[in-house]
Each structure stands twice: as C-alpha cells, then as structure tokens.
C-alpha cells in the first residue's frame, strides 16, 4: 500500500519517539533505583513500534484506543503528550493522570486514549463501550483495542469478541503476539499457531500480519478501520512481533540469546528506514536530523518530569471510589 512522503515521515518520527521514550523511561527508572526509590513495573514497548504506529495512523483524535500494561507506544501513537507521559512515570502532578496512575495508567480522553490497564485482557470488554456508544449515537467513530497473546487466552477476550460480532460494533481487536506472556511461551499456552482463524468462529474477519513491518500493519489496519467506520463491524488482527526488552524491569531476561538476536535483526525501525531511503521518500541525512530532534524532545520531557512536583499528599485518594 502506498503512503505519501509526509505520512511516511510522520510514521517514522512516531516510531522513533516511542523507541526513545522507552530508552529514557528505562533510564529514569534506573536513576530512581540508584536513589533507593522503586517506581513500580515498567513494560517496554521497544520492538513493537510498528503495530501501534501502523494502526493509529488511521485513527482520528475522536476515535478511541484501549491500551494494555505495555501501553506507552499506543499512547504516543494516539497523540498523547510525551512530557505529561514522562511526568506520569515519575508520579508527578503534571503527569497525564495527575501522577496518580503511573506507567500502566496513561489516560487522555482529549486524544481518545481511554487508558492502559494492569489487568491482562481488561481492555477487551472495555472497548465494547466506546464502540457501542458510536453505533448508538450514529457517528462513524471507531475503537481500537490492543492486547497481548496472553490476554487472548482469557475467557473475557472471547466474550468480548462474541459481543462485538453479535452487535456488529465498530471495533478493531489488535493482538500483539510477541511470543511470550511474561515467562510463558505462546506454544505452551495455545494449541494452534495463529489466532486470526479463531475470528471465523465469531463470524468476523481475522487477519494475520507481520507486526514488524509498519507498512503491512498500515495496509491491514486500513481495511479493518474502513470496515468499522462504514458499519461493517469488527475485525481481529493478529500482529506477530517481539519485545526487545525483558517482560518488565523486575523480571530478568530468560529468553535465549539466539532468539533475541534473530528478532533484533527484524527491528521494525531500520527496516522502515531502508524502505524510505530506497523509495526516495527520505535521505539518510533527513533521518539523522529527525532522530536528533526526537532525542532533544525526549530530553526536554525528562527534565520537565524530573523538575515537576509530586501531588499534594491530601489528594492521595482523589479519583478512587470508596
Ligand atoms: C488478569 C491478570 N492475570 C495475570 C496478570 C500478571 N501479568 C501481567 S503481564 C502478564 C503477561 C501478559 O502477556 P501478554 O498478554 O502476552 O502481553 P505482553 O506482556 O506480552 O505484552 C501477566 C501474566 C495480570 N496483570 N492480570
């Protein structure tokens, strides 16, 4: 599928922003640990950038995204502010959720980001809400729901798929199959190779895509988003991908070195860059300049986060139901 120069550049920029955000986030957490502070779990999206970017490139601010525990990439691709996200990581009052949520609770309804989730699979039924609202109100908003293959083994995912198809809701379920659910390999959890064919049993289309190829994701998502927007109902997309980092900062790496190296070789960013240069859409110099700009933005965001204040102690219980 062809993309124009501006869109291609914007997509590469977002992929680099996600990658650099994750590197900076890891650094901030290590800084915290060095001071004796523990900032909670940090699930890096590094390596999976093509999925969030390829899908969200088709979404409008008023469309909804339901994210997961590994959600920084979804939030950035949906247009969330990186300074506010960085401040949220450090629990600062300037954070995107006022410092009350942390890494797994990036939430910004102004850009259609309806939240990350610490409950694996928790986003799959929540996605039915904005999708139903769009259908009920008769507008053409769509909802995209991102989750891992671990979530796809949960009952709630199957209930959600059933209802989405029964009511023909405008929702796209995007399973990011990165082959590992924490320390469980997918082959120990699924009796089949692919998730997408299971969509058929719910009467909806299922598509498998190389999740490390942003253009392939972009093309697959275009079809699913068009279908949802035009009243054609839900789609399940399975994007095969890989996370570059351990499950989270507190679980040591347990995957084979050879597997890690193999997937590093399929890194979605250099792959997309090679395409852009080959097709004459960007030069090496333009790519280097873009990266310099992104790094400066991330450094500024980290400074903003470090310098921001913590929330006042008496706001501790705000936004909680008692
Ligand atoms: C309902 C529930 N069960 C278990 C956990 C603990 N847990 C956190 S992340 C994770 C693995 C999730 O794997 P997957 O859905 O494939 O996403 P990935 O981490 O690979 O992105 C587990 C088991 C949880 N948070 N919620």
Image (tube, rainbow, N blue to C red):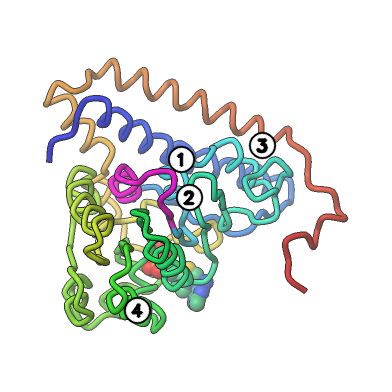
The residue tagged 1 is 79
Q: Neighbour class for label 3 at 10 Å: few (<14), some, many (≥20)?
A: many
**Splitting the image into 4 quarters, where does residue 83 fall?**
top right
**Residue 36: where, in percent of width, then height?**
74, 51
Establish if 116 lies above or below 187.
Answer: above
Point out the image quarter for the C terminus.
bottom right
Between the residue at mark 1 and the residue at mark 2, the CA separation in whole angstroms equals: 9 Å
Establish if 201 lies above or below 140.
Answer: below
Between the residue at mark 1 and the residue at mark 4, the CA separation in whole angstroms equals: 29 Å
* Residue depth check, mark 3 versus mark 4: number of the one nearer the observer: 4
The residue tagged 2 is 112
Between the residue at mark 3 and the residue at mark 4, the CA separation in whole angstroms equals: 41 Å
* Residue depth check, mark 1 versus mark 3: number of the one nearer the observer: 1
Between the residue at mark 2 and the residue at mark 3, the CA separation in whole angstroms equals: 23 Å
Marks 1,2: beta carbons within 8 A: yes
Q: Which residue shows up at 53% across the image and 64% down it?
A: 117
Q: Neighbour class for label 2 at 10 Å: few (<14), some, many (≥20)?
A: many
State which region is magenta.
48-65
Point out the image quarter for the N terminus.
top left
Compare marks 1 and 2 and give the one earlier in the sequence.
1
The residue tagged 3 is 305
């Amino acid at each position: 599928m062809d993309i124009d120069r501006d869109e291609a550049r914007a997509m590469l920029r977002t992929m680099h922003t996600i990658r650099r955000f994750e590197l900076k986030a890891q650094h901030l957490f290590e800084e915290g640990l060095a001071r004796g502070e523990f900032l909670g779990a940090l699930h890096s999206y590094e390596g999976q950038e093509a999925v969030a970017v390829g899908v969200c490139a088709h979404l409008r601010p008023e469309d909804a995204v339901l994210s997961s525990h590994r959600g920084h990439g979804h939030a950035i691709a949906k247009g969330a502010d990186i300074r506010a996200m960085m401040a949220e990581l450090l629990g600062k009052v300037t954070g995107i959720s006022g410092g009350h949520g942390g890494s797994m609770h990036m939430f910004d309804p102004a850009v259609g980001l309806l939240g990350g989730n610490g409950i694996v699979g928790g986003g799959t039924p929540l996605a039915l809400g904005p999708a139903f609202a769009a259908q009920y109100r008769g507008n053409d908003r769509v909802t995209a729901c991102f989750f891992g293959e671990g979530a796809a083994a949960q009952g709630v995912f199957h209930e959600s798929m059933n209802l989405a198809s029964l009511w023909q809701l405008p929702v796209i379920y995007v399973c990011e199959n990165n082959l590992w659910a924490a320390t469980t390999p997918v082959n120990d959890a699924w009796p089949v190779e692919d998730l997408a064919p299971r969509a058929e049993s719910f009467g909806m289309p299922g598509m498998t895509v190389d999740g490390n190829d942003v253009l392939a994701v972009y093309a697959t998502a275009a079809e699913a988003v068009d279908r949802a927007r035009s009243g054609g109902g839900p789609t399940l997309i399975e994007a095969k991908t890989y996370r570059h980092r351990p499950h989270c900062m507190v679980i040591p790496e347990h995957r084979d070195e050879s597997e890690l190296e193999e997937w590093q070789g399929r890194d979605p960013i250099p792959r997309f860059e090679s395409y852009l240069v080959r097709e004459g859409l960007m030069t090496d110099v333009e790519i280097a300049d873009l990266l310099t700009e992104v790094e400066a933005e991330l450094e500024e965001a980290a400074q903003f986060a470090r310098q921001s204040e913590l929330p006042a102690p008496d706001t501790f219980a705000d936004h909680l139901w008692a």
